[in-house]
Image: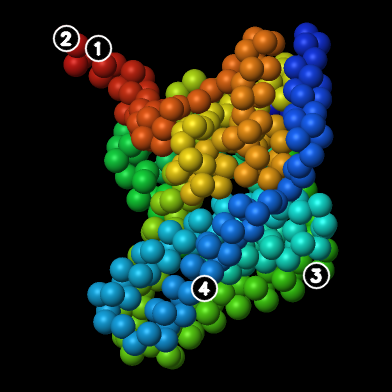
Amino acid sequence: MNQTASKTPKFIERQKTGFYNTLRKRVDAYFIENQISKHANGLMVFKTVLFMGGFLGLYLVILLGNLSPAVSLLLATVLGVFGAMVGFNVSHDAIHGAYSSRRWVNQLISFSFNIIGASPYVWKLTHNLVHHTYTNIPGHDEDIDVAPGMVRLSPDDKLNYAQRFQHYYAFLLYGLASVSWVLRKDFKKFFQKQIGNHVNKHPRIEYVKLFGFKAMYYVMFIVLPLVVMPISFGQWVLGFLVMHLAQGLVLGLVFQLAHVVEDCAFPAPNAEGNIEEAWAVHQMQTTANFGRKSWFTNFFCGGLNMQVEHHLFPTVCHVHYGAISDIVKNTAEEFGVPYLENTSFWTALQSHYRMLRRLGADEWDLRHGLSQAKVA
C-alpha cells in the first residue's frame, strides 16, 4: 500500500463543470414528467418472485425430492446460478434502498441476502459505503482486492510470478470466492479494525444478526442436506462446492466486468491524499457498462451491466437504468466526460481477460525484459 493509502481520499474538482448537477436535474425530470417512481415496479416484483421462488423451489426439490446424485448435482449447479440472480436482481437493490421508498420494505427484502449466505450489513459497509465512494482507488476499494497475492486487479498491486498465469486461473478463484464469502469473508470484514478507511464500530444487534443468520444458512445447506438426503458426506461436499462455484463465478464475472476492463482508470491519490476530479466524473472514469441495449442481459444481470447508472444513482431501482442510460450518455458527451461501455457480455469478458493478462503476464514480461527477448 502506498503512503497516501492511509489517508481518506478527498475529491477535489479543479474545474467546475456542473456535469452531475445537470445530470441529476435531467434524470429527476424524467421520473417527474413520466409520473413514475424511482423504485420497484411490476417488472421488479415479477423478477423478485421468479428468482426468489426459483431459488427456494430448487432448494426444496433437491432436499426433499429423493433424486439421483447426478440430477441433484445438476440442480445444485442451477441453484447456484439462481443464488447469484437473487443477489444482484433482488438483494442488491434492497440493500441500496432502491427497492422501495419504505425503509422496512428494503430491510425485509435485504433478508434475501442471508438466504444465499451473505451478510447484508457487511455488504453495505464494504460495497455501499467504501466501494461506491472510492471506486478503483488502490488501497481503498476492497472490491479490487480479490485473493490478494493471487489475482492482480490493479496496476498498484505488487506483482509476483504466479500472476503471469492469472488470466487462466482467476475465473476458478472467482467461483471459490463464494465459498470463502459464506464461510470466512463476512467474519473477517466484520471483525477487522477498518474496511478501507472506514473504522468498524458495530451495533450489538449486528453481532446477533451475523451469527444468527450464518447459523441459519449452515443449517439449511449443511445440516439438513446431511440429515434429510440419502447422500454421503463426500457427495454433500461435491454438491456444496459445485453450487458455490456456479454462484461465485456468475457473481464474480458480472461485478468484475464493470470495473476491471480496458479503459477503466485506477487513479491513485496525490501526495496530499486527494483525487483531483469530481466524484461523479471519477465514477465515469472507473466504471463501464456492457450489453446496455440487450433485454436479456438487462433482465438477468439485475442492472449490474449498467454500473455507470448504478454508481451515479444507487437509490434508483435497476429496472429504470435502461431508460435513463441515454440521458446519462448524452449528458456525458455534452460535458466531455467519458462514458465507457462494451456492446455485450462477451466483448466485456474478452476485455476483462485482456486486462488480467496485461496486469499479470504482460507486466511481468515487460519488467523482466521477456517481451523484447520474444521479439528478438
Tell which residue pokes out farthest to the front in this image: 34
Callout 2: SS: loop
Which residue carries the number 3 mark?
A: 205
Distance CA(mark 4)–CA(mark 1): 55 Å
Which residue carries the number 2 mark?
A: 376
Of the two numbered discs 2 and 3 on the same chain, state the one appearing first in sequence: 3
Quadrant in the picture for residue 339: top right
Q: Mark 2, mark 4: which one is toward the viewer?
A: 4
Q: Nearer the viewer, residue 83 or 9?
A: 83
Q: Mark 3, mark 1: which one is toward the viewer?
A: 3
- 95 relative to 72, above or below: above
Distance CA(mark 1)–CA(mark 2): 6 Å
Residue at x 82% of width, y 58% of height: 103
Which residue carries the number 1 mark?
A: 372
Which residue carries the number 4 mark?
A: 56
Residue type indicated by callout 1: Gln
Distance CA(mark 2)–CA(mark 4): 59 Å
Residue type indicated by callout 2: Ala
Q: Is residue 197 visible?
A: yes
Distance CA(mark 4)–CA(mark 3): 27 Å
Q: How is the image coloured?
A: rainbow
Judge the density around disc 4: few (<14), some (14-19), many (≥20) Cα neighbours within 10 Å.
some
Of the two numbered discs 4 and 1 on the same chain, state the one appearing first in sequence: 4
Disc 3 vs disc 1: Cβ atoms closer than 8 Å? no
Distance CA(mark 2)–CA(mark 3): 64 Å
Judge the density around disc 2: few (<14), some (14-19), many (≥20) Cα neighbours within 10 Å.
few
